[in-house]
Amino acid sequence: MNWTEGIGEAIDYIEKNITENLTISDIAARAYMSAFYFHRGFSILCGFTVGDYIRQRRLSLAGSEIVSTGKKIIDIAMEYGYESADSFTKAFTRFHGVTPTAVRRDGAAVKVFARLKIIISLEGGYIMDYKIMEKPAFTVVGCAKMFKNGNSYEELPQFWAEHYNAGKDKLIRGRYGICMGESADTDEYEFEYIIADDYIAGEEVPEGCVTRFIPAHTWAVFPCVGPMPKALQDVNTKIFSEWLPNNRDYEIADNFDIEMYSDISDYPDGNSSKDFYSEIWVPVKKLTIPAAT
C-alpha cells in the first residue's frame, strides 16, 4: 500500500469511527505508517493536524444533527466526545459562530467542514532527486526541545536562531537536525527535535545536552540546495506530496528523520547562500504488501 492509498484508508477509518475514541497511532496503523510520519505528512499536506480534522468534522456533524434531528443537545454533545454541555457549547460556538441553542431555537446557520478526499494531480513531470544510502549506527550529542507538528515550520527556525544567538554553536555546531517521534495517542502529537553533532564515545556530554542513538538503517537521501529554511522545507513538503505518493519501492521504516547541514563557514553568506547544501535523510525499507484479511 502506498502513501496515497494509506491516507485514504486512514480517512475512511476516521469517518467510520468519528464518534469513537480515536488515537493517532490507531489511525496511522491503517496507513501502514508510523504515527510520527503519518502525523507529519498529514499536517504538511492538509495545513492542519489530524486532531484538528477530527474536531472540526465532529463539530460539523454535530451541527447537522442539531439542525435535522430532535435529539437533546446534551446527547449530541456526548455522542461527539464532549463531557459537558458547557465544553460543547464553547467549542461549537468557536467553530460555528453561534451557540447550539441559537441553531435549534432561532434557525441560525451552521458551517460545514467536508470530509477529506484524496485527489491525485498530475502537474508536469517533476523529477525529484534522491539516492539510497546504507549507514551504520551512530550516536549524536545535542540540544533538544519538544515541538508540535502543526507549527514546526515556524518554530524550528526560531530554535536554531536561539541556539546561535546564545552562543551554543561553540559547543554544538549543528551538523544535524534530528526529528524523533514517540507515542502518538493524543490529538496534538509532539516530537523531539535535536540540534546535534556526532558524539565521540567517552567524551563528556556538555551541560544541558543529550545523547541519542541512531540505529543502522537504509536511508533515502534528498538533496536541498538554497537558503535555509526554505530550501529544506520545500523539499520536505515534496517528500510527502510527490515522492511518497509516487514511490513504489520503499516504505518508511522508523519514527525519525535527519537533516544534515554543510559547514556554514564554507559559504560567504552562511546558510543564507543560494548554493547552501543540506540533505534530508528518511529511514526506509523495501516496500511490502500487507497480507489480505
Image (cartoon, rainbow, N blue to C red):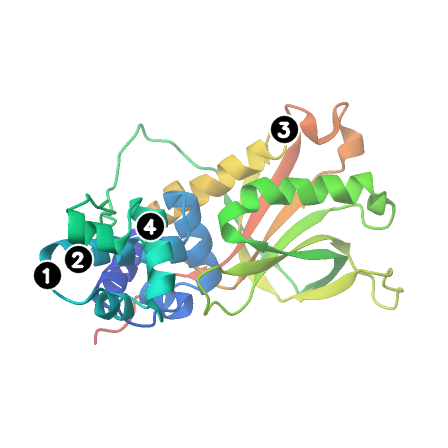
**Residue linked to disc 1:** 69
SS category of the residue bearing label 4:
helix
State left or right for residue 55 relative to residue 164.
left
- In three-dimensional space, the C-alpha distance between marks 2 and 4, rounded to whole angstroms, equals 13 Å
- Give the amino acid at mark 3: Pro
- In three-dimensional space, the C-alpha distance between marks 2 and 3, rounded to whole angstroms, equals 51 Å
- Give the amino acid at mark 1: Thr
SS category of the residue bearing label 1:
loop
User: Which tag, 2 or 4, sits closer to the chain's start?
Assistant: 2
- Give the amino acid at mark 2: Ile
**Label pair 2/3, CB-CB below 8 angstroms:** no
- In three-dimensional space, the C-alpha distance between marks 4 and 1, rounded to whole angstroms, equals 19 Å
**Label pair 2/4, CB-CB below 8 angstroms:** no
Label 1 Cα crowd, 10 Å radius (few <14 / some 14-19 / many 20+): few
Of 82 and 169, nearer the camera is 82
State left or right for residue 67 relative to residue 8.
left
User: Which tag, 4 or 1, sits closer to the chain's start?
Assistant: 1
**Residue linked to disc 2:** 66
User: Which tag, 3 or 1, sits closer to the chain's start?
Assistant: 1
Q: Residue at x 18, y 67 (%)?
A: 72
**Residue linked to disc 4:** 93
**Residue linked to disc 3:** 227
- In three-dimensional space, the C-alpha distance between marks 3 and 1, rounded to whole angstroms, equals 55 Å
